[in-house]
Amino acid sequence: MAGRIRGADGERGALSLMIVVLVVALVLLAGFVVDGSAQLAADENAQALAQEAARAGATSVDASTAYRNGSFVVDPQLAVTAAASYLAAAGYRDYKVFVVSDSEIRVRVTVSEPTKFLSVVGIPLVTSTGWATASLVTGVTGGT
């Protein structure tokens, strides 16, 4: 068997390893694209939820103070309840409502979305937090 060609045995399986590495790299790239867009959507969703919940809370006027002396202020208990009710109705539980002043409310909402590709490498969720502040406005002001 003197006509047998030698030398090819040293690279046996090298192409298989390269394909495995390329497939893993492509899955990671697809994960960053798909799950990265999910992260952006979660950012926008968290911000919008926080804004709407803050608006809902800031409209909770303390009626007794308004009737007693004519000043409009946020009722802290009603504001927290209104913001929490809005978020609960939207299906979110990870939030915090802060009454900043007698006319201002701040809401923090955290939104978590499951990943589609990155869960393969141990990243099961993308998480975003949105903050918003709303103020009670009780009149129209402007130039004459």
Image: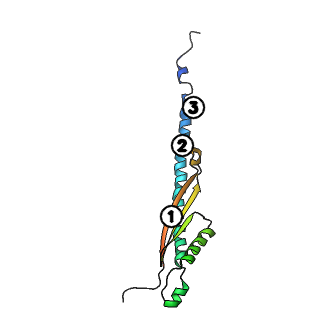
Q: Earlier in the sequence, mark 3 or mark 1?
A: 3
Q: Which mark is residue 55?
A: none
Count every numbered label the image shows and give the total: 3
Label 3 vs label 1, nearer the camera: 1
**Quadrant of the image containing the N terminus:** top right
Local crowd size for mark 2, using a 10 Å CA cut-off: few (<14), some (14–19), many (≥20): few
Label 2 vs label 1, nearer the camera: 1
What's under tag 3, amino acid-wise?
Answer: Ser
Give the vertical position of 29 relative to 94 (above or below). Answer: above
Element marked by disc 2? helix
Mark 3 vs mark 2, CA separation in Å:
15 Å
x 58%, y 75%: residue: 82
- Image coordinates of residue 13 in percent, x first then y, are 57, 27
Q: Are marks 3 and 2 in contact (CB under 8 Å)?
A: no
Q: Which of the 4 image quadrants contains residue 111?
A: bottom right
x 51%, y 61%: residue: 129
Give the vertical position of 142 relative to 92 (above or below). Answer: below
Element marked by disc 1? strand
Which residue occupies the foreground of this view, 21 or 95? 95
Mark 3 vs mark 1, CA separation in Å:
45 Å
Give the vertical position of 114 relative to 69 (above or below). Answer: above
x 53%, y 38%: residue: 22
- Image coordinates of residue 9 in percent, x first then y, are 55, 20
x 53%, y 21%: residue: 10
Q: Mark 3 points at which residue?
A: 16
Mark 2 vs mark 1, CA separation in Å:
31 Å
**Quadrant of the image containing the C terminus:** bottom left
Q: Name the residue under label 1.
A: 130
Element marked by disc 3? helix
Q: Mark 2 points at which residue?
A: 26
